[in-house]
Image (spheres, rainbow, N blue to C red):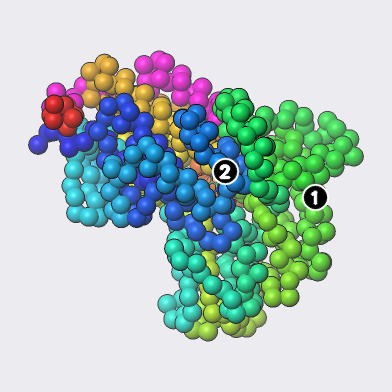
């Protein structure tokens, strides 16, 4: 009974899970992966709403581990659409023969650590029970939907959608009256597309968001060929930059240049478009007065783009800094409100009282709609993990361990849960970076750690409490001056009632994070206790086959 069925169980077959299968198998380990969906892709499998696309440039939002793959795949647009990214991930799964490791339409529902054998018992929704030496949670930082339940919703007679579980068949909104609840990145991408089709669109906004135009374009063959010729250099630079993209952070501060130059820089950034806009100056996220300058610039843009000044005013974010909520990137969002068929509902002024069979009862009266679209986001970074039943040493539950906020070492490992590793988890740079590179970097760190165990005849690694405290302090010291605390965003868990208010991502940027990871590994996994297990537990199922 002390023998594992497999070396590693990977949970999730998105970008992180796919790379984990590839790398760990390449290291000679046996791997089983379980995925709730019926195909690979993760985020790009589930979020199929109209307008869904990446806001990291396609050339960068792609795997870097294989130069051949980089050369063989041709992206068509500056920012890839959801279908194109999904096709790419399906292609990767086929090319590297990853599917044979994956059991689809199967959730991992329970994980419990057996202290005697040092193995994880893994229970799935398919009724399978297996024992693994290691578990890698590649369950996604933005995969557990937040579905507000509004009074009366069960009696609604029309269709209900959530952006993160969009139907696989195209949804036709022609001739329909539609309400969209939520104006985060998903809502802001979706709204212009629904506006083009629907008879009437009501946008229910609780908090306005800052959005920057994407200025997307299609690659010309010769430009793509040139860009790909420099791919290795581009990647090298990406690994050196905080956001994991090949754009170094400026060191110039807002008030080091005069007003005319400031406006010129903001305008230039706006014209380039995309999520880099907040990094116009080095102090935007650390200095309120500097932030107020860029806020005023965006307010001016909203005024230019929206013809009705009252609507423009209601679309202007007030009272929180730009960048404290994830910046949105759009194609035609603000202009949608110039259409006759689009109405903005300002929920703080006109709250939802109930859902009725024919529509939404607002304080001001009934808005009749045929379709209700929730673009209400996610229980981010901890949701997918907390929704699993994970039992560590002494029967402790991870959801209890994290009840006051998640604590980890490097965002990868939790004290009391040996040999359980997290990719893109809380305490990692993930959501503040290009997440293809963060996935590769974390998986590589985990795989190197497992290699180290093999080389030193060890059965496992367990994060130490003291190292967890030190990591917490390190993360807090970097975040102390960050303006991110000043908005009720998912970055701080504020979108989920009762969730502790803790800054979830690592704000020090990818290179500094990589340095910290390297320091730990180079010091023989400092901050981790090595476990010397039974020889039985250390044997892999592959050994048994030999
Ligand atoms: P995911 O892609 O979320 O995959 C996790 C998988 O785990 C899912 O398929 C899920 O079904 C599965 N899973 C979870 N729990 C279980 C369980 N218990 N059992 C079995 N399976 C389970 N990031 C960027 O860097 N740039 C972008 O432009 C960008 N755009 C985004 C757009 C949208 C609409 C969203 C929602 C996110 C976006 N992100 C973006 C973030 C995106 O989530 C990451 O870039 C990346 O896809 C995360 O990959 P992952 O493998 O870590 O997680
Ligand atoms: P989100 O940013 O959390 O936005 C959710 C929206 O729903 C917010 O406007 C929120 O309002 C509103 N909302 C939530 N509950 C509500 C309720 N009960 N009543 C009324 N309004 C409610 O979620 P998201 O738009 O899905 O984006 C999540 C993250 O995914 C992004 O930040 C980004 O990292 C990633 N993403 C990226 C892209 C991209 O461009 N590549 C696209 C989509 C998603 P409040 O602000 O008031 O809470």
| Residue 537 is inside the magenta segment | yes
Of residue 438 and residue 71, the one placed in the foreground of this image is 71
Decide which of 117, 185 is in the foreground and name it: 185
At a point 40% along the width and 36% down the height, the residue shown is: 19
Image position, residue 496 (x, y; %): 49, 56
- Let me know if residue 271 appears in the view: yes
**Where is the C terminus found, in terms of image quarters?**
top left
Disc 1 CB within 8 Å of nearest ligand 2 atom: no
Bounds of the magenta span? 510-538
Circle 1: element type: helix
212 with respect to 528 (left or right): right
Residue of label 2: 75
Occupied quadrant, residue 412: top left
Q: Quadrant of residue 425?
A: top left
Q: Is residue 203 above or below residue 454?
A: below
**Residue at 80% of width from left, 50% of height from top?**
296
Q: Which residue is mark 1?
A: 296
Q: Earlier in the sequence, mark 1 or mark 2?
A: 2
Left/right placement of residue 346 relative to residue 439 reads right
């Amino acid at each position: 009974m002390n023998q594992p069925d497999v070396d590693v169980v990977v949970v999730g077959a998105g970008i992180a899970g796919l790379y984990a299968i590839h790398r760990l198998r390449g290291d000679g380990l046996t791997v089983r992966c379980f995925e709730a969906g019926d195909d690979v892709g993760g985020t790009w499998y589930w979020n199929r709403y109209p307008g869904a696309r990446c806001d990291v440039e396609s050339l960068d939002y792609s795997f870097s581990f294989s130069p051949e793959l980089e050369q063989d795949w041709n992206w068509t647009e500056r920012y890839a659409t959801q279908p194109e990214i999904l096709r790419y991930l399906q292609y990767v799964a086929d090319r590297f023969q990853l599917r044979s490791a994956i059991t689809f339409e199967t959730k991992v529902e329970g994980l419990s650590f057996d202290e005697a054998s040092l193995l994880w018992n893994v229970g799935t929704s398919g009724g399978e029970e297996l024992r693994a030496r290691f578990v890698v949670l590649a369950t996604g930082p933005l995969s557990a939907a937040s579905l507000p339940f509004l009074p009366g919703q069960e009696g609604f007679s029309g269709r209900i959608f959530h952006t993160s579980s969009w139907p696989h068949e195209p949804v036709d909104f022609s001739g329909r009256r539609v309400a969209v609840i939520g104006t985060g990145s998903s809502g802001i991408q979706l709204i212009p597309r629904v506006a083009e089709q629907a008879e009437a669109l009501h946008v229910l906004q609780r908090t306005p968001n800052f959005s920057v135009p994407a200025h997307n374009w299609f690659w010309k063959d010769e430009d793509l060929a040139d860009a790909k010729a420099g791919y290795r250099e581009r990647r090298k630079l990406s690994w050196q930059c905080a956001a994991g993209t090949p754009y170094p952070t400026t060191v110039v501060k807002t008030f080091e240049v005069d007003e005319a130059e400031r406006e010129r820089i903001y305008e230039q950034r706006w014209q380039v478009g995309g999520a880099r806009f907040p990094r116009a100056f080095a102090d935007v996220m650390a200095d309120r007065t500097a932030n107020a300058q860029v806020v005023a610039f965006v307010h001016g843009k909203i005024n230019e783009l929206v013809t009705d000044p009252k609507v423009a005013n209601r679309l202007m974010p007030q009272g929180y800094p730009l960048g404290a909520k994830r910046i949105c990137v759009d194609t035609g969002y603000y202009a949608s409100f110039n259409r006759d068929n689009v109405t903005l509902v300002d929920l703080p002024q006109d709250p939802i009282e109930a859902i009725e069979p024919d529509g939404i009862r607002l304080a001001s009266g009934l808005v009749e709609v045929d379709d209700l679209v929730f673009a209400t986001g996610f229980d981010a970074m901890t949701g997918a993990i907390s929704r699993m039943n994970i039992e560590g040493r002494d029967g402790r539950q991870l959801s209890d361990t994290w009840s006051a906020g998640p604590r980890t070492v490097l965002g990868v490992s939790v004290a009391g849960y040996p040999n359980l590793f997290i990719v893109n988890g809380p305490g990692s740079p993930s959501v503040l970076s290009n997440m293809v590179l963060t996935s590769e970097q974390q998986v590589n760190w985990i795989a190197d750690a497992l290699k180290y165990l093999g080389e030193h005849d060890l059965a496992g690694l367990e994060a130490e409490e003291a190292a967890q405290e030190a990591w917490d302090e390190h993360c807090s010291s970097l975040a102390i001056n960050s303006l991110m605390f000043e908005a009720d965003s998912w970055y701080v868990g504020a979108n989920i009632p009762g969730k502790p208010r803790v800054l979830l991502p690592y704000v020090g940027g990818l290179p500094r994070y990589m340095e910290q990871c390297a320091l730990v590994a180079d010091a023989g996994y400092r901050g981790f206790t090595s476990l010397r297990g039974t020889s039985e537990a250390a044997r892999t199922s592959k050994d048994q086959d030999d």
